[in-house]
Structures are given as structure tokens and as C-alpha cells.
Image: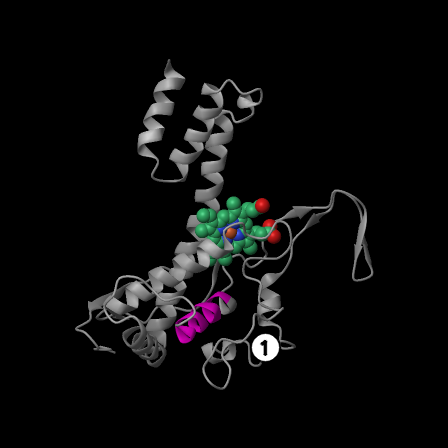
Amino acid sequence: MRVRNVYLWCKRNVSDLVDDVLKIQAEAKAAGEDQADLLTDVNVRQVVADIFGAGIDTTVNTMNWCIAYMVNYPDVQTKVQKEIDDVIGQRLLTDKNKLPYCEAVIHEVMRIRTVLPLNVPHLTLEDTSVGGYNIPKGTQIWTNLWKLHMDEKYWMEPEQFRPERFLDEDGQALPKQDSFLPFSVGRRACVAEVLAKNEILLIFTCLFQQFTFLPAPGKEKPSLEPNFQALVTRCIPYEVVARERISGDSGT
Ligand code: HEM
């Protein structure tokens, strides 16, 4: 009876991932499927915890860095707003692939302040070798994405914040560079790369369409020093003012 109630409730109310997982679980149980017990309540909790754990800190910190950099680089913020005004105007949606400068700014923020600088740890399941080094089974592996994004072999003056490095001479997006891997690579790369890129672009364009971010009165601009904590590159907490824009006003 309980299963049937959950199933009926879910059928009417699926509005997010949690509902969807519960619905799949309830459907499997209601259908008496052999393997229904494989999606236990513990699994459901784990899926939800994984998604929130992996999805929220990364996105929030990326947005925190975007705002910190825009306050420190008001000329870049003005160019971002001009592109948004020209392409989107006051509409509520965004136009992926038509906002090369905004995307270049987001990429440059993700490069210069890689939110997962050492990726997440992996374990070798068998003896292997990489670049001539033998790595025994059971070795914990950390990949240094920070180094990749700061390597002078691939990036000229990597400490400089320069969104144009992701654009060609005509201001159009360059193809993705091999040395740019904020979402890692391979079979265990971020499952939500496409979602994350889209949601960050959407939040970014909505914010700078509606607001100009400025230093808070009497406060320093946000520090750009990285604060490495629990795998994540965080900002040192800062205060800024979000001033509502009058259409077309850069306000900086
Ligand atoms: C700026 C945003 C994000 C960045 C930079 C990012 C980056 C990463 C990285 C580097 C990994 C590790 C890949 C590896 O093990 O080699 C990862 C894994 C993962 N991410 Fe993201 N991520 C972001 C947003 C999200 C979002 C929004 C979600 C979910 C809605 C998400 C879900 C996951 C999950 C579930 C994994 C584990 C994948 C697996 O082990 O198979 N991420 N992410």
C-alpha cells in the first residue's frame, strides 16, 4: 500500500531529480521487478548526496569567483554587459554560442581558479604505467588540474586574467584546448559537464544582465587569493554591492 501511494504521488509530482529517482524506485517495486531491491533507500540517499555534494560547491564557488573577478576587472564586466545587452537584451533566457565573450570570461575564471585543483582521488585497479612510470595496483592517484591550467607551456602569462585567450582574432570562441580540463577527462569525468556549463552561463548572464557588481562601501575589492579547503578552491569571504541596472547602464 505504501509503495502504491508513493508511486501515485510521484506520478503526479515529478518536478526534480529526487522525485524522479523515487518514481523509478516506486515503479520498480510496484511492477514487482526482480531487481527492484537493488535501488534501496540507501542508494537513493547516496545518489542525492552525490549530486548535491558534487554539484553545489563546484557551481557556487565558480560563481563566487566570477563575481570576485568582475568586481576586480570592471572593464571586463562592462564588456560582458554590453554583449548581454546586444545579444539578449531584457529577455529571460540566454543564447548559448552567441555569447563568446561571456563564455570566455567563465572559462578564464575556471582556468585561473580551478575549483577542484587536484581533481578527486582515484585508485588504480590494476598495475599500469603512465609516461614511463610504473604505478602498482591500489595506488591513490591525484591529477593536478591546477598545474595544467597554470602551465606556461600552454598558457602565456598564466597568472594574468585574460578572457581573450579563449577567443580568436574575430572575438569568436577557439576550439577547446587540451590543457583546459576543469571537468577532468575520461570515463570518470564530471557527469554533469554539459549541465554545469549551461547553468553557469544562465546564472552568469542573468546576474550581469540585471546587476552591476561593485565593491561594498568602505570595503576592499574581493581578494583573488585562492583559499584551498577540502578539495575546493574557495574565495576568501567578501562583501560586494549588486546595483540594479537601468537598461544599458554599465554602472561601473
Ligand atoms: C563548475 C561546475 C563543476 C565542475 C568544475 C565540476 C568538476 C568535476 C570534476 C573535476 C569531477 C571529477 C572527475 C574525475 O573524477 O576525474 C567531477 C565529478 C562529478 N561531478 Fe562535477 N563539476 C561541476 C558541476 C557539477 C554539477 C552541477 C553536478 C551535478 C548536478 C556534478 C556532478 C558530478 C558527479 C556526480 C561527479 C562524479 C562522477 C563520477 O565519479 O563518475 N558536477 N566534477
In the foreground, 45 or 174: 174
Secondary structure under the numbered disc 1 in the rendered image: loop
What's the residue type where badge 1 is placed? Trp
Q: Is mark 1 within 8 Å of ligand 1?
A: no
Q: Is residue 232 visible?
A: no
- 108 falls in the magenta region: yes
| Mark 1 residue crowding within 10 angstroms, few (<14) / some (14–19) / many (20+) | some
Q: Is residue 26 above or below residue 219?
A: above
89 horizontally vs 226: left or right: left
Q: Residue under circle 1?
A: 155
Image quarter hosting the N terminus? top left
Whether the magenta-drawn stretch holds residue 206 is answered as: no
In the picture as drawn, the residue positioned furthest to the top comes out as 1
Residue 114, image x and y in percent? 51, 63
Name above or below for residue 152 compared with residue 95: below
**Closer to us: 48 or 53:** 48
- In the picture, measured across the screen, residue 212 lies left or right of residue 231, that is left
Front residue of 10/77: it is: 10
- Magenta residues span 99-110
Task: State the residue at coordinates (65%, 77%).
Answer: 153
Residue 18 appears at what percent x and percent y? 40, 36
Q: Quadrant of residue 149?
A: bottom right
Name which residue lies at 57% across and 67% down: 180
What's the residue at 39%, 55% (across, down)?
A: 60
Q: Quadrant of the C terminus?
A: bottom left
Dividing the picture into quadrants, the one containing residue 212 is bottom left
Q: Position of residue 11 (x, y in %)?
A: 35, 30
Residue 248 horizontal/vertical position (percent): 21, 77
Q: Name the quadrant containing residue 17.
A: top left
Seen in the picture, residue 18 relative to 169 is either above or below; the reply is above
Q: Is residue 251 left or right of residue 51?
A: left
